[in-house]
Amino acid sequence: MWHYATTVRPVLRTTLTVGLVAVAVLAGLAGGWYLHTSGPSGSGGSVSETLSVIAAGSLAPILPSFANTFANATPGVAAPLAAQLYEGSTAAASALTLPDQPYDLFVSADFRVIPQHLEPPTATVASWEVVFASDPLVLAYEPGAAGLSGINATNWYQKVVGAGVTLGVPNASSDPLGANAIFTLELTDQLTHQGGSFYAHFFDGAMGALATPTAVTKFVSENVAATALSTGEVSTFLIYRSYALADHLSYVSLNSSVDLGSTYSADVALYASVKTTELSGTSTSVKSGAPVLFALTVPANAPNYSLGLAFGAFLLSNATAPTWAADGFTPLAPLWTDAASHLPAALAGSPPVGVAPLPSYLAGLLA
């Protein structure tokens, strides 16, 4: 038996003063650690260091405020939006392998991207990651779109195949969200016993094969999902809950068996039972489903490694966890790492909740 949450209407979240104070205090502590380890930078409050960040596109509405809080509490540091890039996590990882890449910190929406694309034996850009939060998929929709009247968490999979309803998803070959959307469709098809017909409404080809969009599915970058919905380019979009909340979108919560938001071993095994094929250049690879887990690392070739590490410690702290939660994430406690022996001491010791090795049932998905 499936148990569904209710349809969620957009609401403006009131910022909690106490939470902001706690975050600001923690930013000051992280900033103080940075100043202590890197030495004085400038004088009289002048800016001499710029924090540069590359992250998943879904973090574009969220991460800049964290960066601003950190910079405001760290003398001599600025975090301009111009020094931040938000795009698909796979594409972002590729950017970090380029000579003279400019970023001090990378935050991925898929905990598999860093180990598989940036760590040995594939590359030497990173040697560790910290996994810090989960974020389920939801179905965002435009309330006035034809065919969606009365949509809710029980009937959403029937409504989305109605006449005139279109679906937006990113390209799975460049953005993990695109693959995650495919996994959610495949899991829904299986658990509603539709024999492939539900999935086939959105993609040509068998489940697990290279997914080619049908006429009702459009490839749309995740960082413009809200615009695509508001302009009518698409009427629905499978997106992370955090993005839907940040952009005040109407959305339907999905069951944990299909939303990729659970870290329980039984759900993870279910997620891993579905697959899709991704294209990279002229070669293809098969990718299995997994929970949506956000992770960060500081590239070994970062222009300012210490600054990236300080900002990473700030993002992973207990003081920021309430803000992550209010933004739709589920912070992990303890945090997880894929390489405990390589984890910088500044991260291993700073979060009071601690950093533990990835559970074996998740570590097995990195292969």
Image: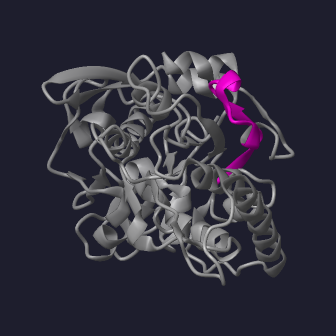
- Magenta stretch contains residue 173: no
Q: Residue at x 62, y 28 (%)?
A: 267
Q: Residue at x 74, y 43 (%)?
A: 346
Please state which of residues 308 and 325 is positioned toward the viewer in this rendering.
Answer: 308
Q: Residue at x 41, y 66 (%)?
A: 83
Is residue 102 toward the left or the right of residue 174 in the image? right
What colour scheme has been applied to the protein in the rendered image? one colour
The magenta segment is: 329-346
- Magenta stretch contains residue 341: yes
Please state which of residues 65 and 266 is positioned toward the viewer in this rendering.
Answer: 65
Is residue 245 toward the left or the right of residue 1 in the image? left
Query: Percent from the top left, x then y, of residue 350?
Result: 81, 46
Q: Residue at x 47, y 46 (%)?
A: 302
Residue 12 visible to the viewer? yes
Is residue 167 toward the left or the right of residue 152 in the image? left
Q: Quadrant of residue 1?
A: top right
Query: Percent from the top left, x then y, of residue 353?
Result: 84, 43
Q: Quadrant of residue 261?
A: top right
Please state which of residues 297 and 260 is positioned toward the viewer in this rendering.
Answer: 297
Residue 192 visible to the viewer? no
